[in-house]
Amino acid sequence: SHIKIPQLLNTISVIVPIYNAEAYLAKCIESLIHQLHTALQIILINDGSTDQSMAIAEHYAQQDARIQVYSHPTNQGQSAARNLGLLHATGEFISFVDADDYIDNDFYSYMLQHIGNLDCVQIGYRRVTKQGEILMQKLPKHFHQFTSPCMRLYRHQVFTQHHLTFPTGMIYEDVIFSLDFWATKPTYKMLPYTGYNYFANINSTTATRNSAVITILFNTLRAKRQQTRSISQKLLITYTILRLKIHFIK
């Protein structure tokens, strides 16, 4: 087993997968380096970008010792990028931020105040325009409503103990990852906080709805439901399928 670098208590490993995000990346990184909670390991994964993303990431890494940059020579997808980030994560906690999003400066200090000995805290988000204008704010009504890993702060131990990774070679991998995460029966708390700013990028992979991609997702979910022996997990997968069907109709 590889030796973990000892980190300060309360260090958060922030994993940012990057693919052709030059228009948004600086704002994302700036929001990380100006956090009120400073004990961060900022892991930037350049996933085969063909624009200036790598140059932007390296520029910030030269200025801030907390930033580490890793790279895939070719685009392998968000899951592979997050998994690479997890291999390098040494913090007590894990956080995921997408390269075209940004967070409020009290994002980590707020969640750390509430996580205590829990495995996870779950928050809401704002949907914003490129200019930062708020289009909507949303808090989850229950723990299983949001499948984005970005709306949570995780205890690192949950990943190592249960060998949690993101499934590669598919879009909407967040859904499958969240089901695997929920299957670990984590202890959690819901927080009335919306400090994550999600930019509705029309060019993003999840924005381009492709019927073949959606079919793969539902087939994967049904296969997962068949494989599990847990009644609660079967119900949760059924709920997720129904919720996604409504989502894709909209």
Image (cartoon, rainbow, N blue to C red):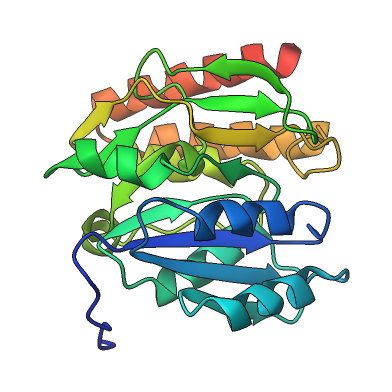
Left or right, residue 80 beside residue 139: right
Residue 189 vertical placement versus 22 (above, below)? above
The answer to whether residue 183 shows anywhere in this view is: no
Q: In which quarter of the image is the C terminus?
A: top right
95 and 128: which one is in front? Answer: 128
61 and 249: which one is in front? Answer: 61
Residue in view at x 73 percent, y 38 percent: 206
234 and 22: which one is in front? Answer: 22
Residue in view at x 31 percent, y 62 percent: 163
The x, y position of residue 148, in whole percent, is: 52, 37
Left or right, residue 3 beside residue 221: left
Residue 63 vertical placement versus 82 (above, below)? below
Instruction: Count numbered badges in the picture.
Output: 0
Residue in view at x 32 percent, y 38 percent: 110
Residue in view at x 85 percent, y 71 percent: 52
Q: Quadrant of the N terminus?
A: bottom left
Give residue 198's quadrant in the image: top right
Residue 80 vertical placement versus 23 (above, below)? below
Residue 65 vertical placement versus 100 (above, below)? below
The x, y position of residue 28, in whole percent, is: 64, 52
Left or right, residue 224 beside residue 51: left
The answer to whether residue 200 shows anywhere in this view is: yes
The x, y position of residue 241, in whole percent, is: 53, 22
The x, y position of residue 201, in whole percent, is: 79, 37
Left or right, residue 62 beside residue 141: right
Residue found farthest to the left? 117
